[in-house]
Image: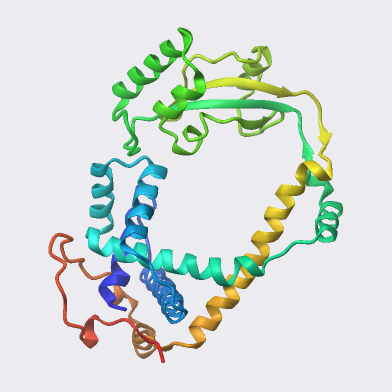
């Protein structure tokens, strides 16, 4: 695993932190980040090599399908996808190789972990009895939403800039007032990919929510089911909400109502344990020489020399010679 590969991931993380307003990392924090990134890359390599030894094959069609699914899930146009690659300092070829590894590892988990996970009726009942307090439906509202922001959201019909966002939310509101179906409009025009993919919602909002202004709760209390709000600004985003329904009193949910939720949670917990166990087995089969960690131990007072190196231009990756200077670890299958 090359130092340049570690630093590409580190620099992407630093860009993400800068976008959230967190620009400062001490040399020690940066060194720790690099160690964590390298450890993750070693783990991924170990699992990938294990998958290959198990005879798992990933075809080019599977890679393409996975990338197309990513584009759909994130609402990315081809231009937005290429921008994402540039921001990550990757070529499309490098990204396809990364996707190949992910798909292989997921196939490994699907083969070795998922079939081993079972949940009995008794375990479901015991979980329900131990967590009854969390299975309560509170008084509140069921809301669908449409969101528009002036930021780059990489979605179709993306409104970029304050004026464009204000104009788009007003157009959407006019559509809804003239009878357009809320779910259809949300799916095609909302810039929140998660709720948009579900036709805007619905999402449950507790009546006693501390996250919402009292004036908004009061507004919802006056609305009838099926009503929509006028455009509401929150921060730099615009929202239109639809009241889909009300939960009028607290109600304890029955075991049958929450059974699928409990099964999903118990399976998740067990899959995490088995995935961790499989990961440890894969790592135990690798011979790893962590050169970066060795250098830190040899020079523990000078983390300032461990700042990320410059990433070569994505347009001309080309094969690079592997030298001790550019290598952060060696991870070889026995």
Q: Is residue 112 left or right of residue 41?
A: right
Task: Pick the quarter of the image with the N terminus.
Answer: bottom left
Q: Quadrant of the C terminus?
A: bottom left
Q: Is residue 130 above or below residue 79?
A: below
In this rendered view, identify the residue nearer to me: 300 or 85: 85
- The colour scheme used here is rainbow
User: Percent x, y for residue 257?
Assistant: 78, 41
Q: Position of residue 100 (x, y in %)?
A: 36, 65
Measured as percent of width and height from the top left, residue 308 is found at 27, 69
Rendered position, 254 above or below 190: below
Query: Left or right of 260: which side holds 333?
Result: left
> Looking at the image, which residue is at 65% across and 31% down?
205
When the figure is inspected, residue 65 is found, relative to residue 298, above or below; the finding is above
Examine the image and state in which quarter residue 293 appears: bottom left
The front one of 22 and 239 is: 239
Residue 233 seen: no
Numbered-mark total? 0
Residue 216 spot, x, y in % from top left: 60, 21
Q: Residue at x 72, y 48 (%)?
A: 260
Which of the 4 image quadrants contains residue 175? Answer: top left
Q: Quadrant of residue 326?
A: bottom left
Residue 302 in view (yes/no):
yes
């Amino acid at each position: 695993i090359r130092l340049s590969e570690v630093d590409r991931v580190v620099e992407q993380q630093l860009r993400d932190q800068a976008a959230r307003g967190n620009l400062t990392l001490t040399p020690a924090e940066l060194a720790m980040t690099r160690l964590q990134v390298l450890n993750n890359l070693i783990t991924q390599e170990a699992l990938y090599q294990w998958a290959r030894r198990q005879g798992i094959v990933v075809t080019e069609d599977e890679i393409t399908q996975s990338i197309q699914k990513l584009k759909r899930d994130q609402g990315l146009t081809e231009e937005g996808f290429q921008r994402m690659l540039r921001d990550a300092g990757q070529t499309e070829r490098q990204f396809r190789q990364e996707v190949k590894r992910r798909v292989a590892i997921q196939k490994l988990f699907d083969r070795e972990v998922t079939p081993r996970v079972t949940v009995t009726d008794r375990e479901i009942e015991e979980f329900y009895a131990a967590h009854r307090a969390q299975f309560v439906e509170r008084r509140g509202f069921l809301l669908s939403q449409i969101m528009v922001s002036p930021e780059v959201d990489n979605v179709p019909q993306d409104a970029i800039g304050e004026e464009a966002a204000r104009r788009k939310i007003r157009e959407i509101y006019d559509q809804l007032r003239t009878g357009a179906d809320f779910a259809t409009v949300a799916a095609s025009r909302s810039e929140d990919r998660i709720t948009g993919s579900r036709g805007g919602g619905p999402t449950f909002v507790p009546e006693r929510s501390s996250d919402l202004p009292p004036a908004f709760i009061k507004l919802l209390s006056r609305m009838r089911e099926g009503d929509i709000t006028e455009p509401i600004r929150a921060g730099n985003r615009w929202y239109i909400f639809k009241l889909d329904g009300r939960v009028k009193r607290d109600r304890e949910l029955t075991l049958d109502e929450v059974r699928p939720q409990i099964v999903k949670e118990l399976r998740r917990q067990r899959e995490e344990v088995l995935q961790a166990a499989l990961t440890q087995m894969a790592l135990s089969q690798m011979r790893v020489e962590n050169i970066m960690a060795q250098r830190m131990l040899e020079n523990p007072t000078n983390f300032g020399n461990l700042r990320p190196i410059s990433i070569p231009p994505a347009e001309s990756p080309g094969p690079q010679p592997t030298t001790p200077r550019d290598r952060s670890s060696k991870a070889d299958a026995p």
